[in-house]
Image (cartoon, rainbow, N blue to C red):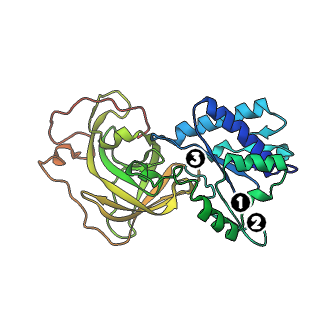
Amino acid sequence: MRQPGERASILNCAAVAFLLQKTLEQLKLKCFPKVSGSKGIQVYIPLSTATTYDATQPFARALAELLARECPKLAITAMAKPARQGKVFIDWSQNAGHKTTVSVYSLRAKDERPYVSMPVTWKELERAVKKGDSQDLYFEPDRALERLERTGDLFADVLPPPSRAARSQTGHGRFVIQKHAASHFHYDFRLEMHGALKSWAVPKGMPYSRAEKRVAMATEDHPLAYLEFEGAIPKGQYGGGTVMVWDIGDYELIDGDYYKGKLRFSLQGKKLQGEWVLARTGDPRGNKWLLIKVGSAMKPLRPKRGGCLGAYWPQHGTNRCSRRRRVAKAIEPRHDG
């Protein structure tokens, strides 16, 4: 994303976009420009394989800082507005799940009549820069519709419909609840989100009655490969003890934002069906959340004695199991929780 500071315009953004295009071509990456409907230009790089923001954001930052070093009079990566005077701010930080970017064909109410955020071709940008005329890069709704009918959707291959693998980025994904008989017995509740498993330790398990609350302590993200992990973590290692999957299935995000500290979601698991809320409490930088049952109440689930669950149900508040059984040895990645 490119945002011009004072005394800079969308034509300056176009000049930086061409520098970026040239750099990406050397990396054999094809990119596509889009005007924002305001003063900026956004450049998109389609990816043919699944990835996460943990990979794309450092890459975007490295590109931005490279251009800022090579063209210090034209581009800058500093967010402070006074430093942007006459320069183009390259906002690499937009590569994050909690950030928002105006979608293609959105209306921007920046004037008496809104402009449309439109995909453009590199040739159109080149013509506008050579003419020194930015008007060709602003599209009112009528002109945008006429252009779309004439050129078709230039972003049809850039933003394909999300696949199942990308569901966790769009409000859907998988969840798992693992019983963890560590030094302190608890349940690990995990939601597939932003390319990882967002995780909470819930000492007393899931609430079933409407408005019932349970403390849920946020822990570090776990890799997606941990979704179906079961096994014995050797004693003395971090999280040492037995881990088993208690419930697993799909979830749908109904409302909220993880980074704003509130999520309302429905679970469709083998055991759990219904709606819950996770809400951060106290310090917004803290890790204490509340897990709250909303919607319809649910009949509490009791452990089976003698079955698979009973085999791992702790007795008398300890982490010792009611009977032993063979488990495959596995080492847990070093994450909190």
Q: Nearer the viewer, residue 104 or 177?
A: 104
Helix, strand or loop status at disc 1: loop
Q: Is residue 81 at least partly visible in the picture?
A: no
Mark 1 or mark 3, earlier in chain: 1
How packed mark 1 is, by other alpha carbons closer than 10 Å (few <14, some 14-19, many 20 or more), is: many
- Rendering coords of residue 210 (x, y %): 36, 70
Mark 2 neighbour class, 10 Å CA radius: few under 14, some 14 to 19, many 20 or more: few
Residue at 17% across / 48% down in the picture? 310
Name the amino acid, label 3: Ala
Q: Observer-nearest residue: 275 or 86? A: 86
Q: Earlier in the sequence, mark 2 or mark 1?
A: 1
* 320 lies left or right of 125: left
The span from disc 3 to disc 2 (Cα, nearest Å) is 25 Å
Q: Amino acid at mark 1?
A: Gly
Query: Which circle marks residue 18 in the picture?
Result: none
- 136 to the left or right of 103: right
| Kind of element beneath mark 3 | loop
Q: CA distance from mark 1 to mark 3?
A: 21 Å
Q: Position of residue 137 (x, y in %)?
A: 74, 56
- Which of disc 2 and disc 3 is earlier in sequence? 3
**Seen in the image, is 24 located left or right of residue 281?**
right
The residue where tag 1 is placed is 37
Where residue 37 sits in the image (x, y, percent)? 71, 60
Res 233 → quadrant: top left
- Secondary structure at badge 2 equals loop
Q: Quadrant of the C terminus?
A: top left
The residue that label 2 is drawn on is 110
* 7 w.r.t. 220: above or below: below
Pointers 2 and 1 in contact (C-beta within 8 Å): yes
The residue under the point 82% across, 39% down is 74
Indicate which disc residue 96 carries.
3
Q: Position of residue 335 (x, y in %)?
A: 43, 36
